[in-house]
Amino acid sequence: MGIQYLPEKKVFLLHTKNTSYQFRAAEFGFLEHLYYGRRIQDCADYLPVRLRHGYEANPYEAEKDRTISLDVLEQEYPGFGVSDFKTPAVAVKNGDGSDCIDLRYVSHKIYEGKYTITDMPSLRENEGGWSTLEVLLRDFSSGIEVTLVYGVMEEYDIITRCARLCNTGEQEVFVHRAHSACVAFPTDKMDMISFYGSWGHERNMERMPVRHGKYTVDSTRGISSHYYNPSAVLCSHDATEHSGECYGIALVYSGNFAITAEVNDFKQTRIVAGINPDTLCWKLNPGESFQTPEAVMTYSSRGLTALSHNFHRIIKYHLIPKQFINRRCPVLINNWEATMIDFNEEQLIAIAEKAKALGVEMFVMDDGWFGRRTDEYRGLGDWQCNLMKIPSGIAGLSKRTHKLGMKFGIWIEPEMVNEDSRLYEEHPDWCICIPGRKPTRQRYQLVLDFTRDEVIDEIFNQLYAEFKDAEIDYVKWDMNRSMTERFSQQLPAERQGEVCHRYVLGVYKLMQRLTDAFPQIRLEGCCGGGGRFDMGMLYYAPQIWCSDDTDAIERIHIQYGTSFIYPPFTMGSHVSECPNQQTGRTVSIDTRAALAYFGTFGYELDPNELTDEEQEAVRKQIAYYCRHGMVSAFGDFYRLTNPEEEKEYAAFMSVAEDQKEAVLSYIQLVSGANKGIIYLKLEGLLDEAMYEIQELGITCSGAALMYAGLPMPVIKADNEARIYTLCAVQE
Ligand code: DGJ
């Protein structure tokens, strides 16, 4: 059991294989954080130092002891208005209008197994190894209770957190803030790594020292968003890929979130993570509860690579749907970049037939198959096949595709409606907008009000009717706008602050219903590219379209940033046509594949327009991915270069879990006359094993490849890639 309680000291010790997390019920029941970091056996209750700091605020019970002050006592889950002046984890408006919340320890329980969260995704228990700690805190004036829940997965060095608020008082309260986790660090010398971006430019890694004051990454767009990812890393200034202390936190949540790091003058850093308080005001009647999303935390004393591996493993074995663990997605072709919305059945079949001849395993029909969808301005909300475009209907087209010997996938955008649609004509009140105000349009569409069950029922029924007689293997679930004018016409005024979170719960509800009804369907998440790339989505969709930017060179940055938290097999990654539609850049088809192999491999082009040479390349690529995709996409991923710093070349590799195979991708970004040789030091291999590098016809030990390195070729071209396949040989 990874959880221990020392009753005489009131200390909770959470242990994983390599980490320890400790806190205690301190004076007057304040829950005080003690330690998080590399595993220690000792009880860390010797760490807090009670000291007068001057101008300090003291709890009433402390009487004349002015050394006890929430100004410096690091609370596990700080409330508001009672002398902890840093960013709170929880804030409420009480029935009497006051805004204090003062949480004190009441009781706890420890049990084997993982707690459950009912209406939101969370890490799955699967084959076990979990233990749970629940600590009950109470504000004795208002009757608000908070249960802090900790899940400990020893083997994976993972600790999960969430909180349940319950109003046991007699008056209604409004919850303005309820974070999933708060963690304290007794140092002001840390860097924060976060992931920013925009459409076509998602998850750029940014690293900077945390300074006095607050730094927040967040979203108010209704989705986790392209702009910031709901994850962050705090690390020592000297942390590299292979050394230094790193703490990671990622939310299992797909809506408005906020992660704030704050540093004060007492050399303390606090990080809080959870639902964005700016768009939350949840009414809690007496007897009602509120559940926060789950936060997943991990620590590495060996740098960022080990930190990423902890996240990658937990996502692989405890987050994605069980039936897709270690099951690669069929190599697919998607018609979006080939046709956009404007297509008909015979065009699609022509793409599928040609793709099949090249070895593609699945055909995916993108946006444009339904309702009045002749352009981006109409049709969303009517999920009936447009028989003018697809005379055989979805059932017929899926069967035709299966007859070709291919699997069949389809695109949907179930959370949206166009004003030019039957659904909107019949139910104009079913979208999120404020009566009397003109709604903001984005891509000429509005967001459906998924806080309403009848809306979810209607969309489910439409999709069910369309899918039930069809042979559908894969669904790309898209979402193409931000939420504005947050308002639900079914909720009373005092509950409008619940819309954003209720919306996310509605999305999860529909995803659950659809995957329950069609368990064979593999979902791919999508949101105008990678605008909702988060652990909440990965619970339902084992892969997410990483970005609408399919340019291989830009993908180096996007996939690099994404890889800090998310493993390659979750990243939808396709070879698309050149000149690239987003950047106009042309790179060789091999360079495009050198990125796409490290994701769910596929194509986003018209195969009928490929030259003979390119067709031959595609055949070889598919054969390669079928043989080595379980290594390149599912192996342990190593970032060999930081593309934000190294501009001459980029390199990354994946190593099979048993370390017997590896795939290395090297991209020379800039060529130059008379260049020196780059010796690339590989990673993740076994020192003593001998690896044959198939493309070079040489065999070297893992030690040689990792410590002496491998000379990279000098290529007379920019943006040219090489793939190297390493296989351990028997001596
Ligand atoms: C945005 C997605 O990211 C694209 O791949 C494509 O599916 C379009 N939407 C379709 O509207």
Image (spheres, grey):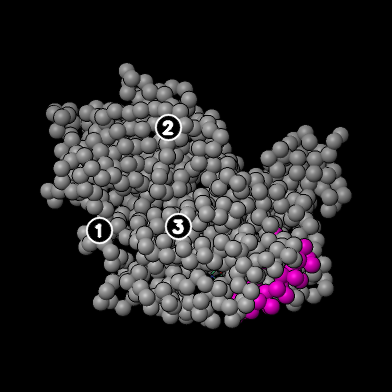
Marks 3 and 2 sit apart, C-alpha to C-alpha, by 29 Å
Q: Which residue: 44% across, 69% down?
A: 416
462 left or right of 434 in image: right
Residue 609 point in image, percent of width and height: 74, 77
* Amino acid under disc 2: Thr
Which of these two is toward me, 146 or 77?
146
Residue 665 point in image, percent of width and height: 72, 55
Q: Secondary structure at mark 1?
A: helix
> Is tag 3's residue or tag 2's residue first in the polypeptide sequence?
2
In the rendered structure, which segment of residues is drawn in magenta?
331-360
315 left or right of 100 in image: right
The answer to whether the residue labelled 1 contacts the one labelled 3, judged by CB atoms less than 8 Å apart, is no
Q: Which residue: 68% across, 57% down?
A: 330
In this view, the mark in front (1 or 2): 1
Label disc, if present, on residue 38 of the rendered structure = none
* Amino acid under disc 3: Leu
Residue identifier under label 2: 132
Marks 1 and 2 sit apart, C-alpha to C-alpha, by 33 Å
Residue identifier under label 3: 510
> Is tag 1's residue or tag 2's residue first in the polypeptide sequence?
2
* Amino acid under disc 1: Arg
Q: Which residue: 79% across, 67% down?
A: 357
Q: Quadrant of ligand 1?
A: bottom right
Quadrant showing the C terminus: top right
Which of these two is toward me, 625 or 86?
625
- Seen in the picture, residue 578 relative to 328 is either above or below; the reply is below
Residue 628 point in image, percent of width and height: 75, 51
Q: Is residue 371 magenta?
A: no
Residue identifier under label 1: 495
